[in-house]
Image (cartoon, rainbow, N blue to C red):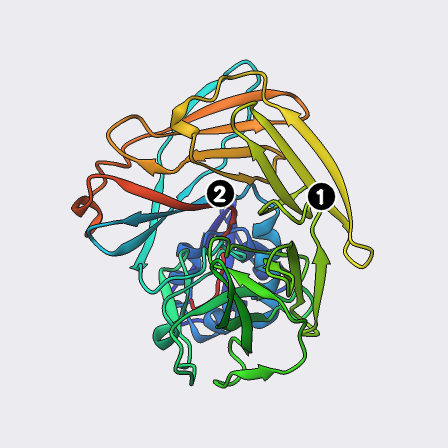
């Protein structure tokens, strides 16, 4: 089937040619066809006519496109820090299916975008393909799929020490940015959270102050977050500034709930496992990974899964390591830096007890502006969940 489209015409005029016969495409079929196309193609279609542009920018279409895009295998998104250039660089790594017998693969990364590194307090994941980054005076939300961004209103505060998190409401389709100012120092790099604000993208340009939230501390050494099923999670500390916990923020109701961690004295790493929030605790010496999955947030109930990676000897390359999980149920292990040695990532499947090694080809030689200013790049985060998104198209 071949679709013929000419400029400046209505969607209802589109025809398909089948065996020499022209047949009009039913209007109801057009959105379904468009939902199967990549973002770059849809960007070109918006120049065809006002009707196409209106359809693609329609809120319901954008939401349905995101739902379909999220069902596809999701890429990993890496954030690299360049010490000399003063920039953070974002790359994605496509999902590679496990081919059974094969243990070693190779893949080519895709450069997404870059941003200034400082001040940059939050290690941000991708939320449905969007990334929130930047200082309080120029906080931005970027869409690597379209390489377009919007700058958020400046927050009226004297403090430059601020954490920001991006969440998504699965019911309304709204994206919200949560910002909190780092307040009084309590103990060993722990600060009280104060002046919490929230902003809804595309609905006004004002930050709303949140008055009602549990007293908790922020840990400067663990500022990652996670958004699952309309709830934003981030690592917090109880008011004693000793016990680790997990704070949840319902993106729709804007209500907070403090969840006691499975081990209050060990700093957790937030991730997801089989569609649920989880925290990772790792022991590199004995190749053991303890995974605690949140089963009931109200009752603070966690289920423990412990795995010993017996299929490989983790060497010093992964002594300082980063963990996450992907949508295939694999635990992803990445080193802390990329230098001259071959750069590879490990994918461990705990249920199958199998390990895959994926070499990332050509990343050191990429011709990206300012990328070659640094001989060695630190990896500050690796997350799963990079998908195509039509925001800011």
Query: Which residue is disc 2 drawn over?
Result: 75
Element at label 2: strand
Picture coordinates of residue 229 (x, y %)? 68, 57
Q: Earlier in the sequence, mark 1 or mark 2?
A: 2
Picture coordinates of residue 99 (x, y %)? 54, 21
Q: Residue furthest right?
A: 299
Q: Nearer the viewer, residue 276 or 156?
A: 156
Q: Which mark is residue 282?
A: none
- Compared to residue 192, the image places residue 281 above or below, namely above
Identified at 50% across, 16% down, the residue is 102
Q: Is the residue marked by circle 1 packed among few (<14), some (14-19), or many (20+) residues within 10 Å?
A: many
User: How many circles with numbers are drawn on the protein?
Assistant: 2
Name the side, left or right, on which 114 lies relative to 193.
left
Element at label 1: strand
User: Quadrant location of residue 363?
Assistant: top left
Q: Residue furthest left?
A: 373
């Amino acid at each position: 089937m071949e679709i013929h489209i000419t400029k400046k015409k209505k969607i209802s005029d589109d025809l398909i040619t089948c065996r020499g016969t022209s047949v009009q495409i039913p209007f109801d079929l057009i959105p379904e066809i468009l939902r199967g196309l990549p973002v770059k193609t849809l960007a070109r279609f918006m120049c065809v006519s006002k009707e196409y542009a209106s359809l693609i920018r329609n809120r319901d279409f954008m939401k349905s496109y995101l739902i379909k895009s999220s069902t596809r295998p999701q890429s990993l998104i890496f954030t690299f820090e360049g010490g000399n250039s003063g920039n953070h660089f974002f790359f994605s790594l496509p999902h590679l299916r496990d081919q059974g017998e094969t243990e070693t693969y190779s893949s080519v990364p895709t450069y997404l975008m870059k941003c200034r590194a400082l001040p940059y307090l939050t290690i941000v994941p991708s939320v449905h393909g969007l990334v929130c980054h930047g200082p309080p005076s120029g906080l931005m939300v970027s869409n690597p799929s379209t390489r377009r961004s919007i700058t958020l209103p400046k927050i009226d505060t004297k403090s430059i020490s601020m954490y920001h998190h991006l969440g998504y409401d699965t019911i309304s389709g709204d994206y919200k940015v949560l910002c909190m100012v780092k307040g009084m120092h309590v103990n060993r790099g722990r600060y009280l959270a104060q002046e919490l604000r929230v902003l809804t993208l595309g609905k006004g340009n004002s930050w709303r102050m949140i008055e009602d939230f549990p007293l908790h501390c922020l840990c400067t050494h663990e500022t990652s977050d996670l958004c699952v099923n309309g709830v934003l999670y981030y690592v917090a500390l109880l008011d004693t500034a000793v016990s680790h916990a997990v704070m949840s923020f319902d993106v729709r109701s804007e209500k907070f709930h403090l969840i006691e961690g499975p081990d209050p004295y060990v700093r957790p790493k937030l991730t997801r496992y089989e569609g649920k929030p989880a925290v990772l605790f790792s022991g590199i010496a004995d190749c053991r990974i303890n995974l605690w999955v949140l089963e009931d947030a109200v009752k603070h109930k966690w289920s423990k899964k412990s795995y010993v990676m017996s299929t490989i000897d983790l060497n010093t390359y992964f002594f300082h390591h980063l963990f996450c999980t992907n949508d295939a149920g694999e635990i992803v292990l990445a080193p802390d830096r990329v230098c001259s040695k071959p750069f590879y990532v490990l994918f461990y499947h705990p249920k199958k007890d199998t390990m895959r090694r994926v070499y990332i080809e050509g990343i050191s030689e990429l011709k990206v502006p300012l990328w070659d200013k640094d001989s060695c790049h630190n990896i500050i985060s690796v997350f799963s969940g990079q998908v195509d998104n039509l925001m800011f198209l």
